[in-house]
Image: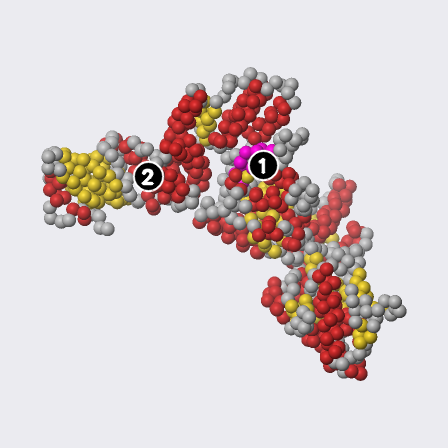
Amino acid sequence: MDIPNELPIIYTTPVLIPGFILKIRLQVEKYSNLLNYLQTNHDSKSKHIGIIPKTDFEKVENVIGTVARIRSIITINSVQDFFLVIEGICRFKLDVKIADEPLHIHKIIIIENFKNLQGDEKVINKLIAEFNKVVIDYTQYAENKLYEPAKRSLKILSNKLPLYQIVDLCLKGFVHLTPADAYEILRATNLNDILIFVTNRLKQETIKEIKHTNSDKTGLIPVIHFNEKNNVMFNSKIPEIPASHELNQIYKAIKGSDMPIPVHKEIMKEFKRLHEMSTSNPDYSVLINYISYVANLPWNKRTEETLDLEKAKNMLKLNHYGMDKVKNRILQFIAVKILNPDRRGPILCFVGPPGVGKTSIVKAIASSLNRTFRRISLGGINCHSDIKGHRRTYIGALPGCIIQAINQSKTNNPVILLDEIDKMYKGSNGDPAAALLEVLDPEQNNSFVDSYVNLPFDVSQVMFIATANNVLGIPRTLRDRMELIYLEGYTEDEKMQIAEFYLIPKILKDHNMNELQITICNNTIKDIIQKYTRETGVRELQRKLEAICHYIAVDVVENSDKKIKNYVITPELLLNIFDSELYSVKNTLVEESCNRVGIAIGLVCTPVGGQVQIIEATKLYSRNKKNCLILTGLAGKVLRESVIIAQNWIQSFVKNNEVGIDNFCVHVHFPTGGIPKDGPSAGITIVCALISLYWKIPLRSMIAMTGEISLNGNVLPIGGVRDKILAAYNSNIKTVIIPELNLKDLKKIPKNIRENLNIIPVKNVEEVLDIVVPGGLAKLQNPSFSTTIGTCKL
Ligand SMILES: Nc1ncnc2c1ncn2[C@@H]1O[C@H](COP(=O)(O)OP(=O)(O)OP(=O)(O)O)[C@@H](O)[C@H]1O
């Protein structure tokens, strides 16, 4: 729409805000020129006029008005007035006068419309939060009075609209504006000013409503306290100013608290009860503790979040090596928050073996967002009330760990780490997972009710991040509510980097030793990794490096009067520090298994990373026991089924090759016997061990394998390929057989490891046998080499 830069101007008492429609009444006598102008020549609807509010504008530097489009002109013959229906289009600044007669014509400068106004990013979130709070308070008291459009606006408001629309709806729906108010808004140069203005007006309206409601019911004039600092309002009927020092303290705590009005009302009821209670009553101290706990909760205290991508990137990089998946996810979270501050992020859950940095990166995330950090250890929790607290009626009742963590953080938007979420279990006193559901569900967590506090607390601002070692340990319902991010173990090279650039500088700083000349050679770090630790993470490595510092510390203290020495930690010195090597680089079990019948090398994934797993099989001849299968080594249900599938596949293979079948027992063992094992991925390894046993052929040495088998001999994909291949590499295995369908996982494996290992993908068991059996599949199919096979039952 073309708006001329010179417009006829009129002055009106009502203020026209862009987007609104106004009907004004003008005297024909006074405005005859304007009426002529609008009625002659062109269609009046294409004409614009400038509307300037009749205020004390001469005192104001810049006079702001609204460009209005004429919607209709209503003239009534018998009346000396006419009506203009005008629609506010945009705002303008009044410029120089062009003419006084026949019309007041001024030059105008169009200024930014509300829609394009910006808010001050630093404070806008706080203002919106406060505004939302005031809207809730207001509607609680004035809902019956609100007319339909306002109620509709309220519904829309809860859908989190862009800010300018919130303001727009407020103007239309809630606030009764005096002309002075409206002019204030018209002149606003940023959205913050408008939001502050509208919030304050709503507060005043709410106070009016509260006064009205309370005096209606009780005839008492309520005490209304307006907390300037937090701009939060309180309303309560205090019985009388409490006499005792203790009660006074609590009263002050309630007054100083920033709890929402409904909570405040409830707490004042309790306070009234306390006030009337005898101090000898056993409930007295319980009630005092309760009220002061609730009053001191951070109902509305928050840290100002820093949403700065570059800063967060640097901070995360500074604290942790690698972990790209986690870092990228956090950067995405920040980017989304910048675009839409109200959007709630998902609940993240980092799953991985111990010591890979799950806990420590959450701390780094909290500081990169400038939020406080609390850790809740869920390991071993077996009771509903550990999460949700105990009812106040119980002796020694306490709030649950969620509210306690929020209370300790003193803010309502901390980062809370739910550590070891896979290690909670259901006890006789309820299921803690069910209680956590309520906390983690974005639909419910803005009114989380802890049994002790017994009042709704908004935990939706809290950023919950969970960690787990084993995804299967996380209750299914909780798993559904979280976004799982898997962290893998580190390779030797990665551990070297972490030790050199992260752990050693951190440990030296912690021990106040960064001034000393300490050199830990690369060979030393490598030796620690290979001979003194066996882990997928770096926690043990960190402990060993700390032990080196403790060793040096004694020397430093004993020789404190002498000149500072240079300390060079060589691999040889490690023997002095740690007494003896803990692990051999060679995996003796694997090496001994070579050239023996009935043994195959498998790969397994444990909660602490990948491992090489030997499978042993032997025949037992016994008169009494025939056709039986003995399994040892704490094999789980799925593993036992894998053995049966392997046996049955071998039987069909034997039949096809016309090999004889005999009756005897087979014993399959999964060392080490003390550790429970389960899962389907040992399928092809079991087949190979049994084939080696039946055909009495030792398998080719140093070949490890992993893959599930189906009854007709297909090799199916399995999980944990990266960890398994790393374990094979660390155990000097030269060839690894994996299912062809797992080829996609190879991109997660460092290039140097891929180049140094012979990784062979297979589709079926025949291909496996062709690789592991000396002489290949042909040798097995040659009847002169075949042997008798046992038919076995479990
Ligand atoms: N990628 C890494 N970069 C730097 N330091 C790391 C890295 N990964 C782990 N660490 C260090 O290793 C130590 C152990 O890490 P952390 O306690 O976070 O492990 P975790 O995965 O939470 O283990 P758990 O599952 O046992 O709780 C910490 O000191 C941490 O700083």
The foreground one among 706 and 66 is 706
Q: Work out whether 762 lies above or below 144.
A: below
Q: Is residue 453 magenta?
A: yes
Asked if the stretch drawn in magenta spans residue 298, the answer is no
Q: Is residue 671 above or below residue 361?
A: below
Residue 278 placement, left or right of 570: left
Q: Position of residue 500 (x, y in %)?
A: 66, 54
Farthest-out residue, top: 243
Q: With 98 as the anchor, is 424 left or right in this view?
A: right
Q: Does residue 756 show up?
A: no
Q: Is residue 679 above or below residue 396?
A: below
Can you tell which quarter of the image residue 76 is in? top left
Most extreme residue toward the right, as rendered?
Answer: 623
The secondary element bearing badge 2 is classed as helix
Residue 673 in view in this figure: yes
For label 1, the crowd category at 10 Å Cα-Cα, with few meaning under 14, some 14 to 19 and many 20 or more, is many
Label 1 is placed on what type of residue? Answer: Asp
* Residue furthest to the front: 624
> Which image quadrant for residue 52?
top left
**Dot 1 lies on which element?**
loop
Q: Which segment is the magenta one?
A: 449-459
Nearest the viewer among 60 and 36 is 36
Residue under the image location 40 percent in, 42 percent down:
155
The residue that mark 1 highlights is: 450
Residue assigned mark 2:
172
In this rendered view, identify the residue nearer to me: 690 or 572: 690
Which residue appears at 71% of the width and 52% of the height? 541
Q: Is residue 670 above or below residue 21?
A: below
Q: Earlier in the sequence, mark 1 or mark 2?
A: 2
